[in-house]
Amino acid sequence: MGKKAKQKSESPIDRERATEAEYYARKCGLTKEEAARILKDARTLKPLAEMAYAAKR
């Protein structure tokens, strides 16, 4: 008898991001996809801002 295949599950971070996108979609009147894209774009810009702040110190 062979081994069972591992079940793929969402990571807690993915679920958190999806929940956050749903919240902002309801609150701001956006679609879930639009809210998720906006949040993703905001997250990619954050490290650049942190690097600029660290360079000023």
Image (cartoon, rainbow, N blue to C red):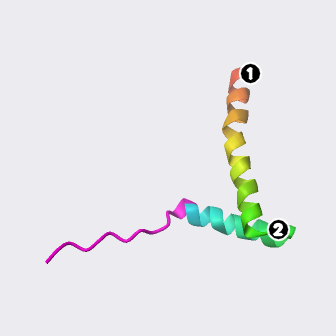
Q: What residue type is labelled 2?
A: Leu
Q: Residue 2, how many percent across, how many down?
A: 17, 74
- At a point 73% along the width and 48% down the height, the residue shown is 42
Q: Residue 56 carries which label?
A: 1
Point out the stretch of residues depicted in magenta. Answer: 1-13
Q: Which amino acid does label 1 sit on?
A: Lys
**Image quadrant occupied by the C terminus:** top right
Image quarter of residue 35: bottom right
Q: Is residue 57 visible?
A: no
- At a point 70% along the width and 22% down the height, the residue shown is 55
What whole-number distance in Å separates the C-alpha atoms at marks 1 and 2?
A: 36 Å
Residue 35 against residue 45 in the figure, above or below: below
Q: Residue 20, how many percent across, how many down?
A: 69, 65
**Image quadrant occupied by the N terminus:** bottom left
Q: Nearer the viewer, residue 31 or 52?
A: 31
Residue 7 against residue 51 in the figure, above or below: below
Residue 28 against residue 1 in the figure, above or below: above
Image quarter of residue 46: top right
- At a point 72% along the width and 70% down the height, the residue shown is 22
Q: What element carries label 1?
A: helix
Instruction: Give the residue pinned by disc 2.
Output: 30
Near mark 2 (Cα within 10 A), the count class, few <14, some 14-19 or many ≥20, is some
